Image (spheres, rainbow, N blue to C red):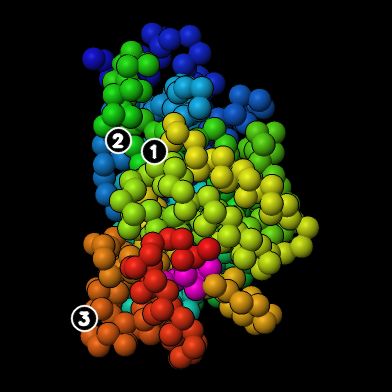
Amino acid sequence: MTRLDLGALAGLPEGAGPLVDPRSLRTRIVHLGPGAFHRAHQAVHTEQAEALHGGGWGIAGFSQRGRSVVEQLAPQDGLYSLTLRTPQGPRTRVVGQLREALHAADDADRLRALLASPEVTVVTLTVTEKGYRRAPGGGLDTADPLVAADLAGAHVPGSVPGQLAHGLRVRRVVCGAPLSVVPCDNMADNGQVVARLVREFVEASGWDDRDTLLAWIDEAVAFPSTVVDRIVPATTDADRDAASAALGVRDEAAVTGEPFTQWVLQDTFAADRPRWEDTGALFVPDVAPYQVMKLRLLNGSHTLLSCLGLADGRETVADAMTAPWAEPVLRAYAAEVAASLPPGLDADGYVDGLVDRFANPAMRHRLGQIATDGSLKVPERWLAPLRDLRAAGREVPVLTGAVAAWARHTRDHQLDDPAAGRLGAAWDGPADRAVPSLLAVLGAEDLAADPVFVAQVRDRIAALDAHGPTVLL
């Protein structure tokens, strides 16, 4: 079968082609981390804005570590298909907004040139929480090998903070044009986080011009915070085969997603941008309320379903939702957490939507994928509301059970987690130290030193072992 590329566009089925001619675009956005989520979310919003208003908003995507995305996309001229999995059946079409598929190390000169170009006015990022190289306190982890190498003067920056700092340094000298850096990962206050990391990298760099650069960043570079939402499962060979059959050409870079999409952006941009607001994106002065609700309800319930579902022999979110315990546990979790949310949010309606989305039988969102990097996710998703509620004098039985479910997951499953070694070691020591050790890995020394809470988590682990997820009700 012929492979998807620019030459194959004319032969695609009616309605399956890009919304705009990819050849009419120029590179105006740099994206770090062009994985499946970016291609199913920000790139699609950008294409829709382009179709409505023009502007030539082509995207150059730079992979950070692995090269598989580049190997899939580059031979296809950056083209790929998005299949929306609706209950009525799949809908597949090609997206053409990604005009360059490159690697941040292999193509470091191109990345540096684009970050210095006045044509580029937006940088977006989806590099996952661990890609930002944060220390437990939230700042830059200068002991991280990639960050340390960048600070030591590596010619090719290997860390995201290093890439941004080096790029901004060149931009100030070459053109001085304003720029918006827009993180789209699930981190609270993600714009402020990235601004802090870039500043701390510059401060630690030893560059002669660092004070001038920091002053220019304050004046010319914006770091809007965002909230993003669309369930995008990892692509399988079956997904690629199905997309290729629908298109009549082979697509090795296919992605799939649910029909629902949300994008909330802080309206603090420093330079020109696509008119995403006309594609359903919401621009607000403060994204924090939306961010808290999404992190604690959607992401938090996802993590809980992954821990409980994997222990129950379930493979996907939709599969887990068929279990008799799933919806009652999800709603009990949401009811407890909702008391920690800012006022004015429709938490009940949001949870009703989550139940419908999670139960979509067309989605095959793997629980194993959701369960990755738990040590980075649990603090924001569960421990933050847990602390808020305990400080308000409220009981937190479901959140305590959630922590127990995660602890049991670290005991019983092979982990894909940057702290996997420390988490495993927690179970190798004395049994009565396992829970405090796990909490310490999460940076929750306060909870680890609370004997009442530790005992409650231990009791819930034993109850889960004996009776399963219904003990959370």
Residue 387, horizontal then vertical, whole percent = 58, 78
The reply to whether dot 2 and dot 1 touch (C-beta < 8 Å) is: yes
**166 shown above or below 320:** below
Name the residue rendered at 65%, 33% in the picture.
279
Q: Please give the label number shown on residue 20.
A: none
The one nearer the camera, 39 or 459, is: 459
Q: Dominant secondary structure of the magenta stretch?
A: helix
Residue 403: in magenta span: yes
Q: CA distance from mark 1 to mark 3?
A: 34 Å
Q: Please give the label number shown on residue 428.
A: 3
Question: What amino acid is found at the position of numbered circle 1 in the picture?
Answer: Arg
Q: In the structure shown, which secondary structural element does the residue marked by tag 3 occupy?
A: helix
**Residue that label 2 marks:** 236
The one nearer the camera, 347 or 215, is: 347
Q: Residues within 10 Å of mark 2 (few under 14, many from 20)?
A: few
**Label 3 vs 2, first from the N-terminus:** 2
Question: What amino acid is found at the position of numbered circle 3 in the picture?
Answer: Asp
Q: Residues within 10 Å of mark 3 (few under 14, many from 20)?
A: few
